[in-house]
Amino acid sequence: MKKIYTSIILILFSVSAFSQNISTLFEIMPDEQLIQIDTNRRKDMYDLKKNGKDSKMLNKLGGYSEITNLTDDYLKLQVSQNSTFEMRILDSIQGGKILAVIKTVCAPSCDSEISFYNSVWQRIPQNEIFVKPSVKDFLLESTLADDSLTNEIIKVADINFLNMSFVDGKPEISVTIPFEELLPEEEIKFIKPYIKETPLFLEWKEGRFVKKND
């Protein structure tokens, strides 16, 4: 009961207090969210990008970071050669806003994690906002009609990696699984005829991410 109460409070707080835009959220972001770039550098990078200038700056780890996409409600940062950081403000069903963050690391296969926050960077439970896609979500409808085949493919392609990114900064996420980078060639040949060739798209609908057209 206590956990449920806390979740409700956080969600209500995100709705009532969310007045910041991406620039403010980027500046007040806790350092642990992005250890490579301190507050002052984040502000400088934002100002440069907002004014149409090159925002590439040296980060704390000796590499370079750059804002590659920026709108009033979306920001994408190339943190390093193999990692990105995305922020997107989303409308909630209560009429307010929440913040979604996608962090992706490629080493070399890309893996992403998504999390949600209110206006002061308090984490919002994502149980009902985002359900992590599974291998089953990438199978063709004709494949899913065969339970035995579906189960066999899931056993072969038991992969937890998901590569996610907002589509053109919209409240829509493109999701792929790097099957060909992580599975042996023989297993790829087996599963390839049964897997969709296009990414899985999730759209923000009625306060949660759902498979597009579902």
Image: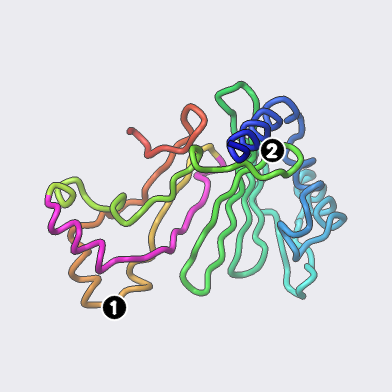
Figure disc tally: 2
Quadrant including the N terminus: top right
In the image, residue 207 lies at what x, y percent? 52, 30
In magenta stretch: residue 97: no
Tell me which amino acid carries mark 1.
Answer: Pro
Q: How is the image coloured?
A: rainbow
Residue identified by numbered label 1 = 184
In the image, residue 28 lies at what x, y percent? 81, 46
Crowd rating for badge 2 (residues with CA inside 10 Å; few <14, some 14–19, many 20+): many
- Give me the disc on residue 129: none
Depth order, front residue of 121/214: 121
Q: Quadrant of residue 117?
A: top right
| Nearer-N-terminus badge (2/1) | 2
Quadrant including the C terminus: top left
Residue ranking furthest to the front: 1
In the image, residue 84 lies at what x, y percent? 61, 60
Q: Is residue 176 positioned above or below 10 on the image?
A: below
Magenta segment range?
146-169
Q: Which residue is at a point 32% across and 57% down the rendered structure image?
A: 135
Q: Which residue is at a point 58% across and 52% down the rendered structure image?
A: 102
Cα separation between marks 2 and 1: 42 Å
Q: Which residue is at a point 28% across and 78% down the rendered structure image?
A: 184
Is 195 on the left or on the right of 108, as rendered? left
Q: Is residue 184 positioned above or below 110 on the image?
A: below
Tell me which amino acid carries mark 2.
Answer: Asn
Is 25 on the left or on the right of 96, as rendered? right
Q: Which residue is at a point 65% across and 37% down the rendered structure image?
A: 6
Q: Secondary structure at mark 1?
A: loop
Depth order, front residue of 154/36: 154
Depth order, front residue of 127/43: 127
- Give me the disc on residue 118: 2
Q: Quadrant of residue 57?
A: bottom right
